[in-house]
Image (spheres, rainbow, N blue to C red):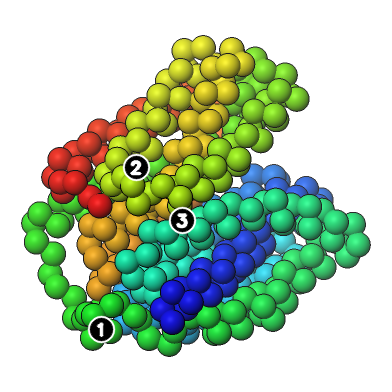
Amino acid sequence: MKVSQAAKATAGLGLTQIVGWGTTFLMPSVLGRHIERDLGLASEIVYGGITVMFGVGALFAPRVGRLLDKTGARAVMTVGSIVYALSLAALSFSQGLVSYLLCWAAMGVASTLALNTPSSIALAQIAGARARQAIAVLAIIGGFASTVFWPVSEALELLVGWRGVVLIYAAIHLAICAPVHLLVLPGRPLVGTQGAAAATAPVPPSAHTKRIFLLLSISLACGAFIFTGFIVHAIGVLRGLGHDPATALLLASLIGPAQVAVRVFELGFGHRYTITASTLFSSAVLPFGLGLALLAGGNFAVALVCVMAYGIANGLKAVLRATLPLALFGRAQFGTYLGRLALPQGIVSASAPPILAATMASYGAEGVLALTFVVAMIALITTIMLVRVSGPIR
């Protein structure tokens, strides 16, 4: 019964995560130029909506994490789908800068209630000991959001315009995502033999736990800076290294398959090695790839290694940012810890694209690679310290 419930929750949340990412974070990639022309906004403002979404979401994340520990995910994620529907519907009627950004701020609240972090908490509460595998499956499914929604957005825009597309997406959240959350998620948190009451009685963290949390927070925040910021500028960086537009596009397109491939590997073979090994590998492969590109990124083979290293590290981190805190802190207060960890990650995710854009404008592709390499090295050093403090993590 429990396995069946976990499977249904994973499939249902996979669907809602594809919709959540596809209708928000990925939406301006296709509809952005139409929004720019219709509202008379600069490209930086249109894409700045994503920054607003991440920033607002980060501010609410700790409180929502505590709420999920107490109440479970059903009500919270259902409300999130409704807020998504309302904010997207409002976006379809926006007329200028203020209304446009306010809609993205509302989507930030919705994302905190119904997107990445709540889905991981929900699976941890439902799947128990199989949470690592369930979260890996969810990450694999979520990786197809661009594959599904980029062509769908393009096709729908030709039929109904960008406002009609956004209104259709609002209807999807209301008619599909909200009912899915109601049907596949339990009304109360399931935390194994500890029971829901344990989740509502937080234990003050020890000095050792606080140190582990600080190191983990720095490591994950550094990763979030690179993974959110670099992907936006990947094609530009590759072109800046001397690759022609077609080659740069080809190389950048390999990031997605690399992410999915490593998540499939993690799902199939993750039980054979420790979370410690996966964490150290993902933290080491990223500066390795970025460092090579900084030295000789104009070479196709070197650029290919960089792209694959980035995709592998990003693919693993999508799983580890949920499974690692779960292994370190347990399920009873998992929502609280994951919500607190989401705050710095959300802030750096919001700031990364404009920071790297400014770096690109001033120092070129080499400047972006140098900055991300330094941040990746900080993440690696912090991860090594974390492993030394926490010991082996299974």
Residue visible at 47% across and 78% down in the picture: 5
Look at the numbered disc 3 and give the secondary structure of its residue. Answer: helix
Given residues 152 and 340, the one toward you in this image is 152
Q: The N terminus is located in which quarter? A: bottom left
What residue is disc 1 on? 195
342 relative to 335, above or below: above
Disc 3 residue type (three-letter): Ala
3 relative to 308, above or below: below
Of label 1 and label 2, which has the lower sequence position? 1
Q: Which mark is residue 249?
A: none
Residue visible at 57% across and 57% down in the picture: 142
**Which of the 4 image quarters holds residue 170?**
bottom right
Look at the numbered disc 1 and give the secondary structure of its residue. Answer: helix
Residue visible at 72% across and 69% down in the picture: 169
Task: Estimate the x, y position of residue 143 in percent, counting from the top left.
Answer: 58, 52
Disc 1 residue type (three-letter): Gly
Disc 2 residue type (three-letter): Ser
241 relative to 101, above or below: above
Left or right of residue 263: residue 285: left
Q: CA distance from mark 1 to mark 3?
A: 25 Å
Tell me if residue 229 can be seen.
Answer: no
- Sort mark 2 into few (<14), some (14-19) or many (20+) by Cα contacts within 10 Å: some
Q: Which mark is residue 278?
A: 2
Of label 1 and label 3, which has the lower sequence position? 3
Left or right of residue 341: residue 328: left
Disc 1 and disc 2 in contact, CB within 8 angstroms: no
Image label count:
3
What residue is disc 3 on? 136
Look at the numbered disc 2 and give the secondary structure of its residue. Answer: helix
Task: Estimate the x, y position of residue 322 in percent, counting from the top left.
Answer: 37, 58
